[in-house]
Amino acid sequence: MGVFPTRVKFERSSRTSVFVTLLLSYLVVLLIPVIVFGGLYTRIESIMVENANNANMALIEQAKQVVDGRLDEMHLISRNTSSHPKLDTLLKSGALQTAEERYDYLSFMKELERYRNSSSFITDFYVYLRKSDTVVSPGFKTNSSILFSEIYGYPNLTYQQFQDDILHGVHFNRFLPVTDVGKGLNKKRMLTYLQTLPFGEKSSPKGALVILIEERQIMGLLEEIVKANHGTIYIKDAEGQILLSAGEHSALANGASASESRMMTVSTTSARNGWEYVSLVPEDVFMAKVIMVKRMAVGVLALCLAAGIIVCAYMTYRAYHPLRDIIRFIRQSHPTRGGNIRNEYEFIKSTMADSFGKQVEMEEQLFRQTPVIRANFLLRLLKGHVDTADISQQSLTFMGITFPHASFAVALIELRDASGFIHHDSEREWALIRFVTGKVAEEMPGYAAYAVELEKNEVAIILNVPEECDKGVELYEWAEQVKRVIEQRFRTVTTIGISSIHSGIGQLPSCYAESVRALEYSIFTAYKPILFYEEMKREAEVYYDFPIETEIQLINAMKSGDAAKTKDIIQQLYENNFTGKQITPEHGRLLFANLLSTLFKLLNALNLRYEDIFGTPAKPIENMTEAGSVEELHSEMQAMFHKACLYVKQQRGDSSTLLLEKIKKYIIEHHDDAMISLASIAEQFNITPPYLSAFFKKNSGSNLTDYLAKIRIERSKEMMKEAGSTISQIARAVGYTSDVGFIRVFKKYEGITPGKYKETLHSLPSTLRKDHAES
């Protein structure tokens, strides 16, 4: 029972709304004869208005000719000034003037005085010289600041706006609307004309010509025409900006419409300067009788409309009965929901809108998640965690994946050295270079490719290979183009491992495993940037696990004399190669020969003799050949490395301190080399960049890049004592390729720019300058 009153109220409001809708439909039919009548009356009225407009047009044409004639005088002065032979010299001259330059100024001012005397229409004008910040007029010479504050300032502009918009802007025959110019008793309403100097300059103007015309000069030309038709004239420039207005209804020029003020409007455009002259004339001057007839016609029309509305209402009421039954049926089938629902139509519309809205919202959420879904899908596809039988074309299309061919390959890109792109070794920079690498590979023509980010410095590329192509050659060309773009544009050294080509999407895990194996072979070959799994199959038969990273760790441990860490590394190598694997003694000897080679490389790098450590002539190869098992080789190698570590530690003492001093000395001697970097210093001392960075931070307390920057800054501060050196020269002298990077680093450590520091240094007395530089 509690629902019934609400339902009745809803139905009543709904019925009323539908009733009005039907009534409006009948009224549209009723309005047809009304529109015909209005059209005929409008035609008669338009003929009368046309006659009045012709009269107004004649007056406005007269006003246009008068004003254009006076403006020609102004344009003649503008052309004479901009083409003056001394103007170009004055635009290029600086603040310090020679006697000849001063004479040029005086001569130029006399010429301007002669130009101004040739026309009584112009109030005043001046020329702004940007390089010297000088303003020259027929009567004075000053700078822009004094001009703005004391002579011809604009109350509605700040000095900065005055400079940017008027003096430094690019203008071509530009006019500013009439506004107050000047201050105090000298304030006048003026029209401002602007012209960039030199004439026609569009990018970097060297000056500006500004001509001022007092408003009363133009108003005097238009006054007689305004009185003749009791109306208003206002002038627009070519961009539609209102420059000035004259007459009794000038407020119309500032936003009121002609229809609201019962005015008639005619306009004409000047072919000389594009100005539009608009005349507004009160309708009551010539439309009094027409308006009376119009009112009578409107009264009769209102009576007819009232009678027609009554008839339409009756017909609407009769037509509503069938619709009411439909409305009640809809209401019973779809109970009213909460919210503001105006009628049954709105109810149906809102119900459908909710359904469509939920669908669109779900689609948008899925679209936003598509990149994440695709990346997760491709990663699981590479790892073999996807049942390929469940993959449908519809799901691939949803993720934006298209595989037009049945053959696949995987290219694994390792970012070997990204120091040219990455400066702070942050995850954000690594994520960016991985993203860039993936995009370069995807957009490279030839294959449908999809990138998958794996480790910190690895990106896998799924390649859909056409069956008809020369697969080996084209894959190599594709990989070579990807590598060239990444290395040249993003300064990142890469190695690419490419799998064999397999048929079917289900073979992608095998492709990925092969690309990993191909990439691993890079440490057993002379550096090859592109490696194919097919080419590496034979090497797999003599494969043993001794990664280059492990060798570097072993060398670094021996250099520091860390016998315990050296023993752990060799033990781990032994377990990786001989525990749970079928490897022959011959292959084991190859592994230990590699270890022995590492030992000799270290001894050679440290200038140590084999006999000084082991006491006997070097016969390690014979001892390795005579060993009966890999266990014996393992024990012998452990003993040799242990003895070498003890000797290194004994001979070198505190090697960390010595190495740190050598590194600092090298940085000081080569700080002016623009190519010096963490990688180049590490190469100089035969260590890895990560180890060098961690070692320097640990033993000196600061980052290596910070230490290099401070050395360069101190050297630059010494060079700034000499006034003849520019900032650009100093930047290159201390090792920066451009002054932009030097300024950024200098401001980071000193708090001010190098230019400001140098200016401050040379503005102090000599004694204070010396103390300041030494501090």
Image: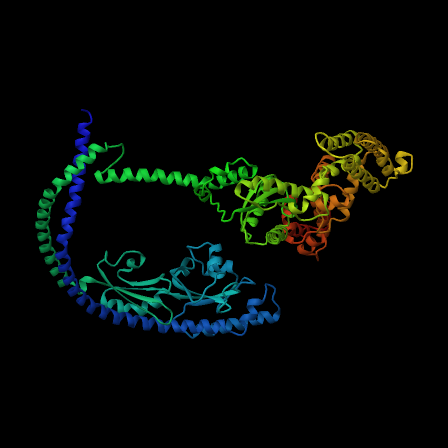
Q: Nearer the viewer, residue 354 or 375?
A: 375
Q: Nearer the viewer, residue 351 or 759?
A: 351
Q: In the picture provided, is 463 more to the left or to the right than 493?
A: left
In the rendered image, is residue 532 in sight?
no
Q: Position of residue 726 (x, y in %)?
A: 68, 56
Which residue appears at 47% of the width and 55% of the height? 161
Looking at the image, the residue that sits furthest to the right is: 616
> Looking at the picture, does residue 275 appear above or below residue 715?
below
Q: Position of residue 320 (x, y in %)?
A: 13, 41
Q: Quadrant of the C terminus?
A: top right
Q: Position of residue 347 (x, y in %)?
A: 24, 37
Q: In the picture provided, is 93 more to the left or to the right than 299?
A: right
Q: Nearer the viewer, residue 32 or 140?
A: 32
In the rendered image, is residue 290 in sight?
yes
Q: Position of residue 235 (x, y in %)?
A: 33, 64
Q: In the picture provided, is 16 more to the left or to the right than 565?
A: left
| Res 549 quadrant in image | top right
> Looking at the picture, does residue 79 appear above or below residue 357?
below
Q: Quadrant of the N terminus?
A: top left
Which residue appears at 41% of the width and 57% of the height? 184
